[in-house]
Image (spheres, coloured by chain):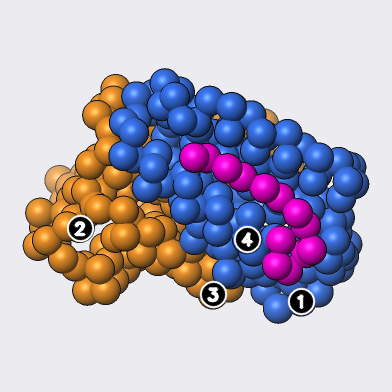
Amino acid sequence: MTKNMENRIKTYEPSKVSEDFSNFLIYPQLNLFQGPQNIEELVTNFIKYKEEKARKEGAEETVKSIITAIRQEINNYIGLITKIVDFVYEAASKKIGSADFKVEEIRTNFCFETRAINVLFIIDANFDNEFSFSLLLNEVEKTVLQREGFVADMLYINKKKVELDYNSINSDYPYLRNLEKKN
Amino acid sequence: MPSDIQHTAQSSHNLSFLESFYSTYKFNDWSITVAFYAAIHIVENAIFCRKKITYLGKELTISHSDEFFGAIGRANLVLPKNQTNFTHHIARNIIVNENFPDIAGHFDLLYTNSRTARYRQYSWDKSNVEFLVKPTIKEIINWSNKNLKTNFQLDLK
C-alpha cells in the first residue's frame, strides 16, 4: 500500500459513500439499537422504534394541545372577570359618581375548575347610592348571563356601615384588582 | 316542596318575629337576616303562584326555585357554562332579576347585607337597619300584597 492510499483510507467518511442509497438516513437510526442478529430483527426493531417514536410524538402533541386549550380557557375566564369588574367600575363611576360614592376595592376568588364568578366590591356609599349600585350589579349579572352564558355572583360590602374584617375577606376573595392602574 | 299556604305562613311567622325584637335595636344583624328570610318566602310564594317563569326569555314551569336548573335542562335550554357550583340563592336571584324586576333591587339589598351580617360583620348601628330593613322589606310586602293578593302585615313602630 502506497503512502497516498493510506491517507485516502484515513479520510474515508461513511456518509459520502452512502449517497447512493435513497434511505441512507435509516442507517444512523438503526445504530441506536443494540445487538440485532439479522436483517429481519433489524427491520422489526426499526418499525417498533418508529411506532414508539410516533406514539411519543403524538402524546406530546396531544399534551401540548391540551395545555394550550387550558391556557386559553384560563385566559378567557380571567379576561371575562376582568372585563366585568372593569365595566362595573366605569359604569358606577359614571352613573353614580358623587362625593358620597366610591368603589374602594374589587376582589375575586378564581376557581378554574368551576369557572365561578365570585366578585366582592367594597364600596363607601350612602344608602341611596348603595341601592343604585345594587341595581347596577343586578343589571350586569343579567347581561353576563344573557351574553356570555355565565352566572356571576357579585356582592358588595358598604364600608360606611361596617368595620371590615380583612382576614375573612382576604381568605374568601384573595385576588385584588389594581384600581390605581385604572385611575 | 312547600305550598303557597306554607310560604305565606312562614313569611308571616318571620315578620312577626322581626316585629318582636326590631325596635330594641339589640339584634340589628338578625333584623337584616330575618327580613331577608321573610322576603325569601314572599318570593317563593310568588314563584309558586305564578308557576310559569322565564329564563332568558324562555318559559319554564316550576313551583320552587330549587327546581330552576332542572327545569332549564328538561326544557333543553342552555345551562349556564359555570352551572356546577350554584346554590338555591343564586337560582332565586336569577329568577327575581328576570321575573320580578320591581323588587329585584330591594331583594338584592337584603340578600347582600344579610350575607354581610351573617359572615362578615355582626355589629350594625340603628341608623343602618332603619335605612336598610324598614323601607326594603316594606317595599317587598307591598309588591306582594298588590300583585299576589297576599295580606302581609308589618309594624316596626
Q: Nearer the viewer, residue B137 or B44?
A: B137
Camera-near label (2 vs 4) is 4
In the displayed structure, A6 sits above or below A89; it is above
Alpha carbons under labels 4 and 1: distance apart:
28 Å
Colour assigned to chain B in the rendering is blue
Please give the label number shown on residue B58. Answer: 1
Q: Amino acid at mark 1?
A: Lys
Q: Nearer the viewer, residue B112 or A17?
A: B112
Q: Amino acid at mark 4?
A: Asn
Alpha carbons under labels 3 and 2: distance apart:
28 Å
Please give the label number shown on residue A101. Answer: 2
Camera-near label (4 vs 3) is 4
Colour assigned to chain A in the rendering is orange
Please give the label number shown on residue A147. Answer: 3
Is label 2 in a helix, a strand or a loop?
Answer: strand
Task: Name the chain under label 2.
Answer: A
- Tell me which numbered mark, 4 or 1, is placed earlier along the sequence: 1
Same chain for marks 2 and 1? no
Task: Name the chain under label 1.
Answer: B
Q: Quadrant of residue A110?
A: top left
